[in-house]
Image (cartoon, helix red, strand yellow):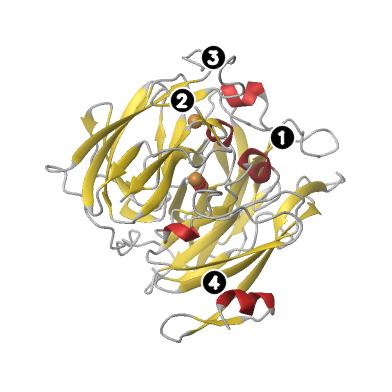
Amino acid sequence: MNRREFLAAGAALAASPGFVILKIRPLKIAATRQALVGAGNPATAVWAYDGTVPGPELRFKQGERLAIAVENALGVPTTVHWHGIRLPNAMDGVPHLTQAPIAANGGRFLYEFDLPDAGTYWYHPHLGSPEQVGRGLYGALVVEESDPPAVDRDVVWVLSDWRLDRQAQAVEDFGSFMDSSHAGRIGNTVTVNGAIRESFAVRAGERVRLRLINASNARIYGLNFEGHEPWIVALDGQPVAPHWHGRVVLGPAMRADVVLDCSGAPGSRHRIVDDFYARRPYRLLDIEYSNEKPLRASFEPAPRLAPNTIPEPRLETAERHRIVFGGGMMGAMPSQREHRGLFWTVNGKPVPESDHRHAPVLTFHRNSSNIIELVNDTSWHHPIHLHGHVFRVVSRNGKPVMPRQLSDTVLLDPDSRAEIAFVADNPGDWMLHCHVLEHQATGMMAVVRVA
Ligand code: C2O
Ligand code: CU
């Protein structure tokens, strides 16, 4: 029996190369309802993986093989993209480019690949993303270190942003002109793990590893932990020297692992405030201490996580490339006569979401080192994501960045530029796009090829 027959038979096991028996985890995509707002409000109609928003927290050990059989019970086709994972191209979940869409009303697809890097990742659709992600399709994918640092708890927070009406239902203006040509669909309700939360309960003296994932279509977060100085220990899943910079900024799709040392007094409360949009700060939730006596009196500095084995680009001899992102309101928006509904450009060209098959904007030799200058020639923020690779951010606005942080998504400020460097070691056609999903769907995406 081959893999597909196994699936057809509904079997839960498949033989992988090397005859290791792999357990296949089913993952069903369907519409359901969930109490996002709570307190006497109606439940919200959502789209969900396995019946919950966010979808199930998938946890694996570094080096393990993931095998997930997706079944799509929605009335629209979809795919699943495994954001940040260096996987084989055919498993990347980009419709038409790497696979056929998973058909509506019962289509299936088996995703199966190794997990080379430890860290915090996530999964989401790559088709009709403004609506599919906006209705609740996303979940955490955690790859644990073989020797994880000692913490009392390891907790994931999936941050999502909703535009709800008075009946707590999603406003169905997905992909509106306003959102698409401006900052994207920024909503009016922020949830943590699928609900508005009043508080996060901790005990004094506890050390918590918080894995923050921004699964929002467009909202950028700037989180301030009042009374605390959490250590940032990883960004986009990749370890960084533990440090604290006052707030954690997360553009769409970005992740941060922080070590939160609960140094507050028993019984105290401290706010976490998001003030990224200076005129609209709000309280995300409170850190709420129990009255128990402290678990420990003081904290060691946060441990440094073991690095993943990402190939190191050779900067001196790297090939140089340049990609210019343009368009948007107050910018050089494509002519609506020629490109109806497309508002953004990559190197002057808008690419519709339905056309993943256009020619690559760049082609790299396999295993070559490359530097791409990403130029944001617009008045808006853009988190730019490259599939299949992890890159170093080497400069911003012409100034070297130190340390050169590893990422898969780099947040470009309005009218700014950044250079990213990476080894093109993963063959295939890969998306390079803005992760404001309304921008991606209206022109701000491209394909790059590793030959
Ligand atoms: Cu998180 Cu191209 O996606
Ligand atoms: Cu954008």
The alpha-carbon separation of the residues under discs 2 and 3 comes to 11 Å
Disc 2 designates what residue? 345
Disc 4 designates what residue? 67
The quarter of the picture where residue 316 lies is top left
- The amino acid at mark 3 is Ser
Could you classify mark 1 by the number of other residues whose Cα lies within 10 Å: few (under 14), some (14-19), or many (20 or more)? some
Q: Which circle, 4 or 3, is nearer the viewer? A: 3
The alpha-carbon separation of the residues under discs 1 and 3 comes to 29 Å
- The amino acid at mark 1 is Arg
Q: Residue at x 38, y 53 (%)?
A: 428
Q: Of callouts 4 and 3, which one flags the residue occurring earlier in the amino acid sequence?
A: 4
Query: Which SS class for mark 1?
Result: loop
User: In the image, which disc is placed on residue 315?
Assistant: none
Q: Which circle, 2 or 3, is nearer the viewer? A: 3
- The amino acid at mark 4 is Ala
| Side of 25 relative to 346 (left or right) | right
Q: What is the x, y in percent for residue 346?
A: 42, 28
Q: Which circle, 1 or 3, is nearer the viewer? A: 3
Query: Which SS class for mark 2?
Result: strand
User: Height in image: 290 above or below 235?
Assistant: below
Disc 1 designates what residue? 163
- The amino acid at mark 2 is Thr
Could you classify mark 3 by the number of other residues whose Cα lies within 10 Å: few (under 14), some (14-19), or many (20 or more)? few
User: Height in image: 145 above or below 287?
Assistant: below
Query: Which SS class for mark 3?
Result: loop
Q: Residue at x 79, y 51 (%)?
A: 35
Q: Of callouts 1 and 2, which one flags the residue occurring earlier in the amino acid sequence?
A: 1
